[in-house]
């Protein structure tokens, strides 16, 4: 640890400025090495809160930059969510709810599989519509797709293949815990959200505006 006891504020400021100048030079050099531009596949997984929330933030950022965005939500059913209400008001954003609800509520495996297949077809159609010189979308968010794959309602192979062969400039964001290894392999950026503490475990119910 640096001893600052006998140094004046002027000396401390000068040392700090010199360190930051050195850090900026290193950062600029690293940034200059990154020259590739292409569409990315991002996967948000893990048992922590915030996977979908981060994806919706990404959708908001993309829309704010003039991107055309598609958000496909699996498993949400008829749930009235804050993000659903807002997304429908944003220009250039299409929002689809393709599930019948959480699996423990539906208690209908055959129906859940049918909904998963129909929802995946929405994703495939959105991906295919984003090819060519005038893509329909620049970003597609597939919220809770990992849950659908986790329950084997869809085979992983066609999903991984679709991601691998997406249009070069199209961005994808896939959320949900327990992401399949095959999906992690084809993704560009994978973030694991780790739970350290959650109010629900202490008996606090899911809160409107925070969880949904």
Image (cartoon, helix red, strand yellow):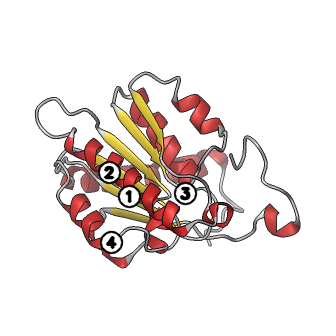
Q: As rendered, which of 51 and 102 lies closer to the eye? A: 102
Confirm whether residue 22 shows in the render: no
The Cα atoms of the two marked residues, 2 and 4, are separated by: 14 Å
Which residue lies under the disc numbered 2?
Answer: 121
- Distance from label 3 to label 2 (Cα)? 23 Å
* Residue 148 horizontal side relative to residue 164, left or right: right
Mark 1 vs mark 4, foreground winner is 1
Res. 137 image quadrant = top left
| Mark sitting earlier along the chain (3/2) | 3
Comes first in the chain, label 3 or label 4: 3
Quadrant in the picture for the C terminus? top right
Tell me the residue that label 1 is attached to. 117
Say what secondary structure mark 1 lies in. helix
Q: Do the residues labelled 1 and 2 touch (CB within 8 Å)?
A: yes
Q: Nearer the viewer, mark 2 or mark 4?
A: 2
Dot 3: within a 10 Å radius of its alpha carbon, few (fewer than 14), some, or many (20 or more) residues?
A: many
As drawn, 32 above or below 181: above
For mark 2, does the 10 Å Cα neighbourhood hold few (<14), some (14 to 19), or many (20 or more) residues? few
């Amino acid at each position: 640890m640096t001893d600052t006891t006998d140094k004046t504020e002027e000396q401390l400021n000068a040392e700090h400025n010199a360190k930051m100048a050195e850090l900026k030079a290193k950062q600029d050099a690293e940034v200059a090495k990154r020259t590739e531009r292409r569409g990315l596949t991002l996967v948000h997984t893990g048992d922590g809160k915030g996977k979908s929330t981060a994806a919706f933030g990404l959708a908001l950022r993309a829309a704010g930059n003039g991107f055309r965005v598609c958000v496909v939500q699996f498993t949400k059913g008829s749930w009235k969510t804050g993000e659903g209400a807002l997304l429908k008001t944003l220009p250039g954003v299409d929002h689809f709810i393709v599930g019948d609800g959480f699996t423990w509520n539906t208690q209908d495996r055959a129906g859940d599989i049918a909904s998963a297949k129909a929802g995946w077809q929405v994703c495939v159609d959105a991906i295919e519509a984003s090819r060519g010189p005038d893509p329909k979308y620049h970003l597609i968010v597939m919220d809770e797709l990992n849950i659908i794959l986790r329950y084997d309602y869809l085979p992983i192979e066609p999903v991984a293949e679709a991601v691998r062969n997406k249009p070069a400039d199209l961005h994808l964001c896939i959320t949900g815990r327990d992401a399949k290894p095959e999906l992690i392999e084809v993704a560009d950026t994978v973030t694991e959200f780790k739970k350290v503490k959650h109010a629900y475990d202490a008996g606090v119910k899911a809160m409107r505006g925070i969880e949904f």
